[in-house]
Amino acid sequence: YEIERELRLALNDSGLELYLQPQVRENGELVGAEVLLRWNHPSRGMVSPADFIAVAEQTDLIVDLGKWIVRAALAELKRLPAPLTLAINISPRQFRKYDFVYFIEHELQQSGADPSRLILEVTENLFVEDLGDIISKMEALQQSGVQFSIDDFGTGYSSLSYLQRLPLQELKIDKSFVQAVGNQEQQAIVDSIVAIASNLRLRIVAEGVETQEQVDYLARHDADMVLQGYLFDKPLPIEDFHRNYFTS
Ligand code: G
Ligand code: G
Ligand code: MN
Ligand code: NA
């Protein structure tokens, strides 16, 4: 792939950038941010990871890319005032590497970032194979304080039976469900996901929140709820995030 060669170049030549999207409580209080990768392509401009992560996933390029992201994100977490958290998307191929636990622990030490303020977002398709091995790795990292979240929850391979075996702190309700609020049948899915999370004592992050109607509907549930979406802020370049949230 041409795109693969270009990505390798970008990786070595500071063509990649981390953006941060704020995560807030219903009252607007900032609790943390999700790290979202951006590629500043020389001719195509800002390219979304939606257009290149899947290609990178097909080879070990995702592993090198993932390592770069983790290092850059932990440097950022170190800068972020406590108790704010930082969530990073981890691709299945990166997680499945034999040295993933060692890598994260090593980078945590090198950076001096607080492990308990790091949230690793994984998707349901991580759990389709080698569940025992996946759980062992999650448990090892959880021992160090690292938190785990299931991203895009409800859109992937779902077996509710494994959920209670996983060492999790959080479920992220996929934006397709959040945006269906207002539709009687579809919003029942939001209710079900919130009920599952509450029963398992998990925090819920609702992503893709764009309207006050969605906030009101989500806030009606008695749950540990965090909100993320364009209604509050879009993903921001790191310096804009700091300027907007930490200077007066
Ligand atoms: O950032 P959106 O802004 O366009 O992201 C599109 C998709 O790319 C989402 O599914 C998101 O999870 C994924 N993504 C964004 N940043 C990263 C990243 O740093 N690593 C991985 N593996 N996926 C990412
Ligand atoms: O798959 P993941 O949840 O990691 O990616 C989140 C994706 O959602 C990113 O592409 C991000 O830019 C996008 N996003 C964040 N907030 C909103 C929103 O309010 N509406 C929409 N449509 N997309 C959003
Ligand atoms: Mn995510
Ligand atoms: Na998502």
Image (cartoon, rainbow, N blue to C red):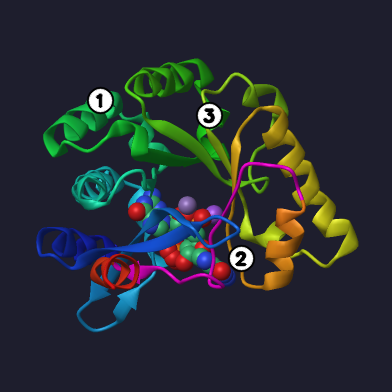
131 on left or right of 221: left
Q: Mark 3 and mark 1 in contact (Cβ < 8 Å)? A: no
97 on left or right of 183: left
Label 3 neighbour load within 10 Å: few <14, some 14-19, many 20+? many
Examine the rendering and report whether any part of residue 146 can be seen.
yes
- Residue 240 position, x and y percent, is 28, 73
Q: Residue placed at 43% from the left, 61% from the top? A: 22
Kindly identify which numbered label has been placed on residue 209.
2
Assess mark 2: CB under 8 A from ligand 2?
A: yes
Label 2 neighbour load within 10 Å: few <14, some 14-19, many 20+? many
Q: Residue placed at 40% from the left, 68% from the top? A: 235
Kind of residue at disc 3: Leu
Above/below status of 237 relative to 88:
below
Label located before the other in sequence (2 or 3): 3
Would you name the residue on which mark 3 appears?
168
- Distance from label 2 to label 3 (Cα)? 23 Å
Name the residue nearer the viewer: 47 or 71: 71
Kindly identify which numbered label has been placed on residue 173.
none
Point out the stretch of residues depicted in magenta: 221-237
Residue most extreme to the front? 248
Would you name the residue on which mark 1 appears?
99
Q: Residue placed at 47% from the left, 40% from the top? A: 122
Kind of residue at disc 2: Val
Q: Is residue 231 located in the magenta-colored stretch of the structure?
A: yes
Above/below status of 82 relative to 197:
below
